[in-house]
Image: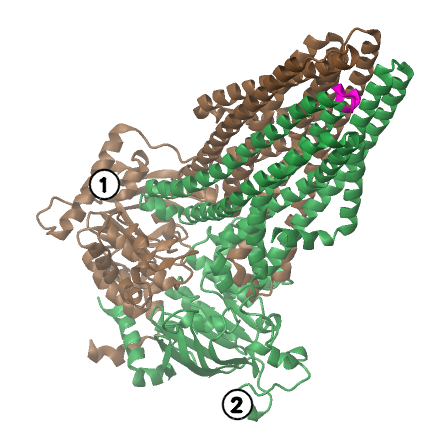
Chain colours: A brown, B green
Amino acid sequence: MSADVAARGGTAAAKWRTAGRLLRLLKPVRRRMAGVVAATCAFAALNVAAPKYLGDATDVVVQSVVGGTFDEQRLGRLLLAVALMYLGASLFSWIQGALTATAVQRLGYGLRAAVEQKLHVLPSSHFDDQHRGDVLSRATNDVDNVSQALNQLLNQLIMSVLMLTGALAMMLWLSPLLAVIALASVPVSTLITVLVARRSQAHFTEQWASTGELNAHLEEFFTGHEVVKVFGRQEAAAATFGESNTRLFRAASSAQYVSGVVQPLMIFVSNLNYIAVAVIGALQVAAGSMTIGGVQAFIQFSRLFSQPMGQIGGMLNLMQSCVASAERVFALLDAPEIPADAAEPAAGAARAVAVRAADVCAADAESAAAEPGPPGRVSFEGATFGYSPGAPVVEDLSFTVEPGQIVAIVGPTGAGKTTVVNLLMRFYELDAGRITVDGIDIAEMPRDALRSAFGTVMQDAWLFTGSIRENIEYGRPGASDGEIIAAAQASHVDQFVRSLPAGYATMLGNDGDSLSRGQRQLISIARAQLAGRGVLILDEATSSVDSRTEAQIRQAMARLRQGRTSFVIAHRLSTVRDADLILVMDHGRIVEQGNHQELMAGGGFYAALYRAQFAGREQPESVLEPEL
Amino acid sequence: MLLSLMGRLLVAHRMTVLAIICLQLVQTTANLMLPTLNAAIIDDGIVAGDTPAILRLGAWMAGVAALQVGTAIAAGYLGAVVAMRVGRELREELFAKVQTFSSQEVGVFGAPSLVTRATNDVTQIQNLTVLVFTMLVAAPASFIGGIVLAVRQDLPLSGIVMAVIPVLAGLMLLIVRRLIPLYRRGQELIDRISRVLREQIVGANVIRGFVRQEHEIRRFDAANRDLTRNNLDSALLVAGMNPMIMVVVNLSSVAVVWFGGHRIQSGQMRLGALTAFIAYILQILIAIMMAMYVFTTAPRAAACAERIQVVLDTEPSIGGPEPGTALSAASPQKLPPPEQAPRSGRGPVPEGAVEFHDVAFAYPGAEAPVLSGVTFTAAPGTTTAVIGATGSGKSTLLNLLPRFLDPTAGSISIGGRGTRSLPLAELRGLISMVPQHSYLFSGTLAENLRVGGPDASDAELWQALETAQAGDFVRDLPGGLDAPVSQGGTNYSGGQRQRLCIARALLRPAPVYLFDDSFSALDYGTDERLRAALEPALRAATVLVVAERVSTIEEADLILVLEDGRLVAKGTHQELMESSRTYQEIAASQLVLEETP
């Protein structure tokens, strides 16, 4: 029991921390917020003062009935003052609204930017075990909810609180007795709010969590819709979707109606209060201690007092919904990041690597002959890594690549070949051992400097929404049309692009779905060619490209690779035959290394793979022999 | 759009909606009675000095207030349930609709936009529904009630109210009209935001590899700025609305005291009426503010409703059986297969026989067709391979069979029946497929495999994995069949994913198997063992294979060579090596790749 209470207390404290953090986000716009508070003060003061003068005006009318003299001039003066006050109040209310809107929109902008920038410093593993749809939901649905709710909250909450205090002050001034009666409603209202809030908060948290979950489901089903269809799994998909849809429905409606109870209850309390004021006020008038105009003004103030109370209660659901969403956004922002890059000395060295790499690119155009030795000495020393603890994908990997060498990594599917590349690029951090580039431990280099040394073509060709030209240019921003077309020609993109109606301006959308996988690979090769980095990494770069095209690309690549260290992962052993170093991997370990001749002579795993690949291939060979 | 959409959804809940309206009417009436009772306290109690009357009227007021809170809570409860149900139904409808879409329609909207529409857009409509129930019923009632009571209190003074209403209506109309386009654009910009983010998540490694984080941040920033600016525009409009209405209403209460004062002075009006009148004006003001709150939410919901309705109104380009052939589709078992293709003379066609007759396909608006004049027959128990350059139309050809796309000319039949004459579910029931994008769902390996065979036992799963050459690596995984899979299968290598997709397809026995470039990420040894293992498993089936490597398809019974969407040659490996120049070139290029040092 006590533990339960403690736990609830803990979560409540967490909610307050979240709310506090949300408010701290307003810090950059604090001047604007000060303006908001000032404008609201002015508005509230005028809005509170106006009914008092309107009450005085009523008294002028009352006096004319009771006393017989009608001071029309006084009535006119009072009403003019009231009218000016109301005009002023509206002006300040407008200023306040406009300032709040800009502040909140800035906050929303900042939150979205923070979420996006966070994506760039999350470790790659984060995306492996988090649903893409859920992350997206946090960045869109939750941020949207926070800013929508905050806009209303800041507008109304500040105003409500000020109206409350203003009305209270006026009431105290008019009649302390009645003010005390009115104040009696405050603890009652607070109690109601607290009781309800305790019950509804969990529902709001659940509501936004299930929105994220639903988003994730939709993301998956809409992305993989072809698979769903071809396997006739629409019903099963609909059932899964239906479940999370119903969960969202339950949470959302519970949250809505539990928190929705507050406002009617508040209105009830305020009505009772109103009655008490009316009855007691009437008795006071009867006793002669108050004027009718005074009672009338007081009644209006008690309205002004209880209305914001009700509004604050009514904002409860907004507040809770806002906090629930903010928690999810903050959770994403607080997710562990990639460890920060090590500071200066090594960083300088790494920059040197990158600069020298760039030199090679520059020199490439002229002649690479007279240049000092290009960078790119890569060394793995006992590198061990696993995506999940206790299940190493690569184990105790050791090898050295000299600058300018071509290294091929071969081995059965799942042997850990791509992982080697991921480790070299520091998409993942080693569990043990180290990797050096030109003698510097890559763990001590800034990641960006390290990666600037590599030109990569990944296994999954990734293209973004934009034109084909933009997708190629991605490798080297600001490249000229000539350079882009040259890269496109070398990688055989040019041929199929020319057959497209819009050519290089053809827009690619939705993961480049309009292109075949082979075409996407070609574009990413063009991108890497254009980038012209010091070390080239080709991970199954041409697996879906037809062989005729591939042969032509290989020639172009051979030119590109000259003088550069390159890593090639390929299944076609022919591709790797001319490599300077072949690493044969199996089950995360290097089982053999050497060049083609050595490995064939060794008669081990490689030789077996090689023979398997060319088993029964004599026939075509003989057919074509004369041509070669 | 918004009205028709909400109207349609609410009709289903009309009894509840009716109950809500009744409850809200009671609630509003109770609320309106309170100032009247208060006026009575002043006139009959205070002015008359009648204390028992004050207490009696006070008790009445308490009773009315209790009634009000009870009905308000009940209405709130029902309103929340109906609004959330409407949301759930809309999401369901959208989901069901997208399920009927072909790749083309999904492509037109884009998956991220469809997701936004089903979540964010629906939420907006849901929010509006909640508001409508809590306010739009109460607001007009309290608005009209306020006016009626004001008129009853004093007709000439009500003239002020009457003059103010058109002014307010005009102001609101003006603002709402400018809001709708802003909100519409706002939702589009949210789409853009989520599209950019999605790309950044999917392409995280490429972005990092090319060190383009700065560029991505700028790209996102542009979208973010646009959204913020657009939101700010609409927020400023809304911020201007409140004070405008307040000033109009408050000034009218000043006018009430001025004119009312004169009327009381001349004895045309009682004193209590003035107090009540100000209360009514306040009542009307609150009603307008409530309505305004709805009106500021409505434009955004209206923009969302449009976006949802567009999806719901989109007719999938690929539907059920075509009208002309509906008869054969209705009772496929009983009727002999209608003659779809010239070969029907030889009695019943085997279930899995696939026939393409002069098939062409072009994307709408495209200049050149992707495929044209493709004719071939694939018989059960044979393997037909499709080879050709990147972009020659191989995958398109395969995608025509399960009707992910429909040919723009010619006909395709399966088992002697035209694919368009079959209900989609039945047609796709005849086909098991390994798609080009080896897509896996998040969950466990077993769950993914059971997409193919929902009732398969663990032993059957293992058997399929063994055949697909995936048994070894799955066994090594911690958790085995229960090993986790992340969305898209990104925690497995390309080759592993392809084999898992093959195992998934094998778990679904079908007369026709399609392999769309399913071996490209496999090393040769695995490829070869896989093909050897597949051979007995698929012996009776019609197999269509798209491949890049000649070695993968050498043993196929029929090889189709595609070039620029045309079928330039067909035959066996032997025949093609002798007759087809294109095929020779393809084979030669692979030997160059494989054999030249």
Q: In front here: A295 or B535?
A: A295
Identify which residue is drawn at 82% across, 14% down: A282
Q: In front here: A409 or A398?
A: A409
The span picked out in magenta is B264-273
Left/right of residue A293 with respect to residue B358 in the rendered view: right
Q: Amino acid at mark 1?
A: Ala
Residue occupying the far front of the picture: B266
Q: In front here: A288 or B401?
A: A288
Classify the position of the N terminus of chain A by image quarter.
top right
Classify the position of the C terminus of chain A by image quarter.
bottom left
> What residue would you read off at disc 2?
B343
Tell me the quarter of the picture where residue A618 sits: bottom left
Dot 1 alpha-carbon crowd within 10 angstroms: few under 14, some 14 to 19, many 20 or more: many
Disc 2 is attached to a residue of which chain? B
Left/right of residue A395 with respect to residue A251 in the rendered view: left
The vertical placement of B490 against A143, above or below, is below
> What residue would you read off at disc 1?
A354
The vertical placement of B406 against B458, above or below, is below
Q: Position of residue A323 (x, y in %)?
A: 58, 31
Q: Amino acid at mark 2?
A: Arg
Left/right of residue A589 with respect to residue B421 in the rendered view: left
The vertical placement of A329 against A610, above or below, is above
Q: Position of residue A76 (x, y in %)?
A: 63, 17
Residue B476 at least partly seen: no
Q: Position of residue B48 (x, y in %)?
A: 87, 15
**Callout 1 secondary element:** helix
Disc 1 is attached to a residue of which chain? A
CA distance for labels 1 and 2: 67 Å
Observer-side mark, 1 or 2, equals 2
**Callout 2 secondary element:** helix
